[in-house]
Amino acid sequence: MALFGFLGGKKTSVGLDIGSGIIKVAVIDHSGSEAELVKVATTEVAADAIVEGEVMDPGIVAEAIRGLFSTAGVKHKSVVTAVGGRDVIVKKIQMDRMKEGDAREVIRWEAEQHVPFDMANVELDFQILDPDAEGLQMNVLLVAAKRELVESRTSLLGEAGLEAAIIDVDAFAIHNAFELNHPDAMQGVVGLVNIGHEVTNVNILEDGVPVLTRDLSVGTRRFREDLQREKGLSAEDSERVIQGQTQSADLAQYVDARGEEIAVGVERAAAFLATASRSAGGLGRVYTIGGGARVPGLNEALSNRLRVPVELASPVQRLKVRDSVFESVSVDEVAPLLMLSVGLALRRAA
């Protein structure tokens, strides 16, 4: 499912994740019998150049992207990137059973019943979840994004000297990498929690299908600001503490407080799904990704609060990785940041 474009038969794909704190790129070679990760790179972006996923200073962000590609030696100009946030709606709906071609003709009318945007300015896509089932109704996963969001992303890429082969949706791209690396998590109700710089994305999967997304206004920036404000630590020292590079007993109370916020968001999303889907059982397991997944003690705090197992997910647990990829960086340190960029690079439309 993609809002824009397709890759065709290209042998190499480049996934570009433009995060609020860090920009990440992953390159995957599709020429062999299985996909192989051949390069990853990251760069920090200037503070407040991107706020909650919205690019506030395109010039600075475009320059950071150009610098990242140059430093990493990525010469490809065609990339796969994604949009997300409050201007993207992902919803599981029911509609009259019909063939996909017929559904495409009426999906905009169906979407009007579920999408709180002006339909004249929306990019739409959908996927039939039960194409082989019987009955008069079928389950459909609907995605809608404001056209302005898609256009601003293509404009930013153009300023950086790049073009979009595909513009995906964050939740689907993350799921793409997660499904490959954690196939055992494709049964029951599972939470996939992406703890970013400013926003935490909660994705609820039902039998392997991402059916519900929620954004929470809490991320690693809040952890760092807590330590700066209440403990007098510098920004650099706070960052080292939340990344686990420096031990600090002061962190525990903030982990509990912010963990509570995240856990409540996960609970509410899972509860909403339970009321909307007759087949949904209770939340069985949670996986964390993103920079915040590295915060010492956070997974344990979430597990204690949610009363389900919580573990760190990896985008390279089963993915083939070229030996040189992690020569200069620690795989344990950088892997939690790469689920989205790897998921994007895995996209290779037929």
Image (cartoon, rainbow, N blue to C red):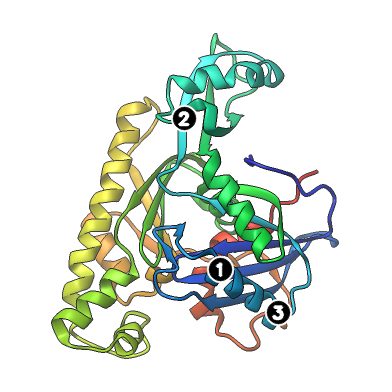
Question: Which is nearer the eye, 251 or 112?
Answer: 112
Task: Name the mark on residue 70.
Answer: 3
Point 33% across, 70% down: residue: 220
**Residue at horizontal 36%, vertical 59%?**
199
Q: Residue furthest top?
A: 136
Foreground residue among 255 and 183: 255
C-alpha span from label 2 to label 1: 37 Å
Q: Could you say which quadrant of the image residue 21 lies in?
A: bottom left
Amino acid type shown at disc 2 = Lys
Give whichever of 17, 191 is nearer the camera: 17
Against 240, is 258 above or below?
above
Neighbourhood count class around disc 3 (C-alpha, 10 Å): few under 14, some 14–19, many 20 upward: few
Query: Is 305 situated left or right of 237 in this image?
Result: left
What amino acid type should be assigned to the residue bearing mark 1?
A: Gly
Q: Is residue 251 visible?
A: no
Q: Quadrant of the N terminus?
A: top right
Cα distance in 3D space between marks 2 and 3: 41 Å
Mark sitting on residue 92: 2
Secondary structure under badge 3? Answer: helix
Q: Amino acid at mark 3?
A: Ser
At label 2, counting other C-alpha atoms closer than 10 Å, the crowd grade (few under 14, some 14-19, many 20 or more) is many
State the quadrant of the C terminus. top right
Q: Nearer the viewer, mark 2 or mark 1?
A: 1
Q: Earlier in the sequence, mark 2 or mark 3?
A: 3
Residue 170: give x, y in percent of width and height: 52, 51
Instruction: Tell me: 7 left or right of 47.
Output: right
Disc 1 to disc 3, C-alpha distance: 16 Å
Which residue is rendered at x = 32% and y = 71% of the image? 221
- Mark 1: few, some, or many residues within 10 Å (few <14, many ≥20)? some
Disc 1 versus disc 3: nearer the observer: 1
Q: Secondary structure at mark 1?
A: helix
Residue for badge 1: 59
